[in-house]
Image (tube, rainbow, N blue to C red):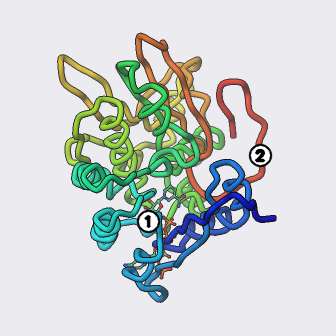
Amino acid sequence: MTSPSSSAFRVGLLGHGTVGSAFHALLEERAEAIAASVGLRPELSGVLTRGRGDFDDIVERSDLVVELMGGLDPAYEHVMRAIRAGRHVVTANKQLLSHHGEELYAAAREHGVQLRFEAAVCGVVPVIRVIHETLAAAHIQRVHGIVNGTTNFILSEMTTTGASYEDALAEAQRLGYAEADPTDDVSGRDAAAKMAILARLAFGAPVHIDHVPYEGIENLSAEDIAYARELGLSLKLVGSAERVDGGIAVRVFPTFLYAQHPLAAVNGSFNAVTIESPAITEITLSGPGAGGPRRPRRCSATWCRR
Ligand SMILES: NC(=O)c1ccc[n+]([C@@H]2O[C@H](COP(=O)([O-])OP(=O)(O)OC[C@H]3O[C@@H](n4cnc5c(N)ncnc54)[C@H](OP(=O)(O)O)[C@@H]3O)[C@@H](O)[C@H]2O)c1
């Protein structure tokens, strides 16, 4: 039933792949609930893929443009043109933000539109909103976390089954947790892009992905995992951003964690981010890092386990 008081809010969708099609389905399924909550009823105004839709026409007919194409080209130009046309933009594109965030934030400010990107880091875990809004005045000292579900799945698989890196990667690909070309994930570059975005939000200073040193998991072996286990430690790919000597240090590296560490129990494709500030001590947010809707799983009070 359509809410009589809600007016239409036109949403143009750029990209209709894994995330775009899941978003499209959710938008239709939840339109009435959104209308009841915010008084605006979202309606799809157009879809752009390589073989479908016209970009200018979609922007013309939209109040909000949602960019789910990925990559830098033509995503950067499309997002910039949508902002300059006075459209609000939502994007899940971490590469775009970690390369061109400053230009895009500035353009959005100049044109009085919102640029939102919650899904660019940690999938459905609302870490962007918490850092940017909830903790805006908390003087965050450090943000660290597991921000790549593919590598966390591979390391969990190596830990629980004793599998080699190659076999665990093959299993991740078979289950759809890793892409056919997993380079961005396993090299740590995807996590570096996400940490650049989180550091920019947490500390209010520009952080480009080229300023984030990173190392991935390609060179880890079953022996490394066995060694960690022997010492009662977990081996995780951890991204860290912190204030150091008046500056900021951001990096991504495989890290040994003691068993009681909040990130040590984050397994499978789950993500988790811990935020530290003298005002709040620390909080850890956790949940699924990628993919479409899943059946609910049992959760503990602080984090979910897979
Ligand atoms: N997958 C995840 O779980 C996940 C999670 C968080 C964030 N993200 C981010 O979400 C974004 C989308 O990821 P995805 O996995 O959904 O990608 P995807 O499955 O590869 O889908 C990309 C979509 O964009 C369209 N597209 C690509 N280049 C285009 C171009 N030049 N012109 C017009 N359309 C173009 C593709 O069109 P065709 O259909 O014609 O090929 C396709 O519909 C990325 O930025 C990714 O980093 C993904």
Q: Nearer the viewer, residue 131 or 112?
A: 112
**Measured along the vertical axis of the image, is residue 268 above or below residue 68?**
above
Residue linked to disc 1 = 67
Quick one: which residue is furthest to the right in this view?
1
**Number of residues whose C-alpha sits closer than 10 Å to that of mark 1, classed few (under 14), some (14–19) or many (20 or more):** many
Residue linked to disc 2 = 296
Does the closest atom of ligand 1 sit within 8 Å of the Cβ of label 2?
Answer: no
Q: Which residue is drawn at 77% across and 42% down?
A: 297
Q: Which residue is drawn at 47% across and 63% down?
A: 64
Horizontal side of residue 132 vs 167, given as left or right: left
SS at badge 2:
loop
Quadrant that contains the C terminus: top right
Q: Nearer the viewer, mark 2 or mark 1?
A: 1
Quadrant of the image occupied by residue 95: bottom left
**Number of residues whose C-alpha sits closer than 10 Å to that of mark 2, classed few (under 14), some (14–19) or many (20 or more):** few
Q: Residue at x 36, y 54 (%)?
A: 113
The numbered disc on residue 42 is none
Horizontal side of residue 149 vs 175, given as left or right: left
Does the closest atom of ligand 1 sit within 8 Å of the Cβ of label 1?
Answer: yes
Horizontal side of residue 40 vs 47, given as left or right: right
Q: In the rendered image, is residue 47 in sight?
A: yes
Q: Which of 247 and 234 is in front in this view?
A: 247
